[in-house]
Image (cartoon, rainbow, N blue to C red):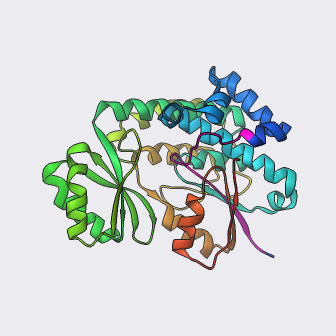
C-alpha cells in the first residue's frame, strides 16, 4: 500500500480566479468562502475570483486567500476521492502552507487558522515595510556556495539564506542594497539563473522582527490540539505533534530558514512514497521532481 502525504503551497501560489469553479460547484467550498468573508470582514471571494492581481498579491490578503483556496481544493478531493483523504498519513506545507497542513491534521480549526494567518500576513507586511528588502531565487548553487554569496555581499548589505527548496534551488532574503549585488556575484560563483521574487520583503530572515514576537502573542492564546497525523515543520524538518511545540516552530518559522528540501527527504526516509499537492499552482510538484523524479505527486488544483 502506498504511504500518502499531502503538501500545501505557500505565498506566491496565488492567481486571480483561484477557487471560482469550486465555489460554484461544491457546497463545502462555498461554505469556506462564506465563513472566510465573515471572519475577515472583507470580500475574500471577490478578490480571489476577480482580483485585481495587485490586491491579491498583498501579503495580508494573499496569505488568507491561499489558505482558504487550498482548503477548498482539499474539499474537492474529499468529494471525489474520499479514500485518499482517509488514507493520508502525513503532511507538510511551504511557509504559509504549514498552517493549512495543521488544519488538515486537526491541530487548528478553520476559523482559528484563518485568524492566525490573517494576523501573520499583517505583521509580516508591517515588518517588510520597515526596511526596503526582498527575496531572490538563485538557481544552480548549492548551500555552501550560497553561504559564500552571502559573505561576499555583506559589505553592501545584509543577506541570508531563506528557502532551501531543493538541489541548486535556494532563495535568499536581504536588504535592497544587498540584493542589488546578488546577480553579479552569484553569476561569478556559477549560478545558472537569478530570479527576483514578487514579494513585499525579506521573509524568513531576521528582518521580519518583530513580526515573530507579534505572532507569538496571537499563537499563545489560540486553541491548538495535538496533530492526528505528523506535520513536518519547515524549520527543522521534524513533526511536532504537541501544541506548545507547534507554537514554538511557527514563531521560529517567521525569521528562520524554510528547509523544504530536508523536509521532503525526511518524509521519503519515513516511508512516504505518494504525494498530493493541494491548492493553487504546481510549485511543490516541481520542487519534488527536482529532489526525486521517481516519486509521484498529483496536483489537486484550487480551480
Residue segment shown in magenta: 2-20
- Depth check: 34 or 259 in front? 34
Can see residue 258? yes
Residue 16 magenta-highlighted: yes
Percent coordinates x, y for residue 159 in the rendering: 26, 52
Spot the residue most to the bottom. Answer: 294
Residue 179 magenta-highlighted: no
Task: Please give the name of the residue rendered at 17% of the width and 54% of the height, measured from the top-left corner.
Answer: 154
Which of the 4 image quarters holds residue 296? bottom right
The total number of labels drawn is: 0
Position of residue 236 in the picture relative to residue 28 (left or right): left
- Depth check: 93 or 289 in front? 289
In this rendering, is residue 45 above or below 170?
Answer: above
Percent coordinates x, y for residue 214 in the rendering: 45, 31
Can see residue 216? no
Task: Please give the name of the residue rendered at 52% of the width and 73% of the height, measured from the top-left corner.
Answer: 291
Spot the residue most to the left. Answer: 155
Percent coordinates x, y for residue 53 in the rendering: 52, 36
Which of the 4 image quarters holds residue 190? bottom left
Percent coordinates x, y for residue 253 in the rendering: 46, 48
Which of the 4 image quarters holds residue 221? top right
Task: Please give the name of the residue rendered at 37% of the width and 33% of the height, measured from the top-left corner.
Answer: 127
Q: Quadrant of the N terminus?
A: bottom right
In this rendering, is residue 187 above or below 161?
Answer: below
Per the picture, the main secondary structure of the magenta-coloured stretch is: loop
Position of residue 46 in the picture relative to residue 58 (left or right): right
Amino acid at each position: 500500500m502506498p504511504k500518502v502525504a499531502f503538501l500545501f503551497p505557500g505565498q506566491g501560489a496565488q492567481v486571480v480566479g483561484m477557487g471560482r469553479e469550486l465555489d460554484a460547484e461544491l457546497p463545502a467550498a462555498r461554505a469556506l468562502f462564506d465563513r472566510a468573508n465573515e471572519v475577515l470582514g472583507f470580500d475574500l471571494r471577490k478578490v480571489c475570483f476577480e482580483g485585481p492581481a495587485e490586491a491579491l498579491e498583498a501579503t495580508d490578503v494573499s496569505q488568507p486567500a491561499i489558505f482558504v483556496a487550498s482548503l477548498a481544493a482539499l474539499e474537492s478531493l474529499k468529494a471525489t476521492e474520499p479514500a485518499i483523504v482517509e488514507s493520508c498519513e502525513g503532511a507538510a506545507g511551504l511557509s504559509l502552507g504549514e498552517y493549512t497542513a495543521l488544519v488538515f491534521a486537526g491541530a487548528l480549526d478553520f476559523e482559528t487558522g484563518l485568524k492566525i494567518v490573517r494576523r501573520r500576513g499583517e505583521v509580516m507586511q508591517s515588518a517588510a515595510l520597515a526596511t526596503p528588502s526582498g527575496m531572490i531565487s538563485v538557481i544552480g548553487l548549492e548551500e555552501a556556495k550560497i553561504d559564500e554569496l552571502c559573505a561576499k555581499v555583506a559589505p553592501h548589505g545584509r543577506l541570508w539564506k531563506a528557502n532551501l527548496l531543493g538541489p541548486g534551488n535556494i532563495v535568499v532574503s536581504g536588504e535592497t542594497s544587498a540584493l542589488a549585488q546578488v546577480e553579479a556575484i552569484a553569476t561569478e560563483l556559477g549560478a545558472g539563473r537569478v530570479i527576483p521574487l514578487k514579494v513585499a520583503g525579506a521573509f524568513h530572515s531576521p528582518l521580519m522582527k518583530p513580526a515573530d514576537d507579534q505572532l507569538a502573542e496571537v499563537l499563545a492564546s489560540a486553541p491548538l490540539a495535538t496533530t492526528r497525523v505528523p506535520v513536518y515543520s519547515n524549520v527543522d524538518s521534524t513533526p511536532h505533534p504537541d501544541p506548545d511545540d507547534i507554537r514554538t516552530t511557527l514563531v521560529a518559522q517567521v525569521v528562520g530558514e524554510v528547509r523544504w528540501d530536508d523536509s521532503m527527504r525526511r518524509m521519503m526516509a519515513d516511508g512516504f512514497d505518494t504525494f498530493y499537492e493541494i491548492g493553487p499552482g504546481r510549485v511543490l510538484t516541481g520542487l519534488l521532481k527536482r529532489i526525486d523524479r521517481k516519486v509521484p505527486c498529483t496536483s489537486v488544483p484550487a480551480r
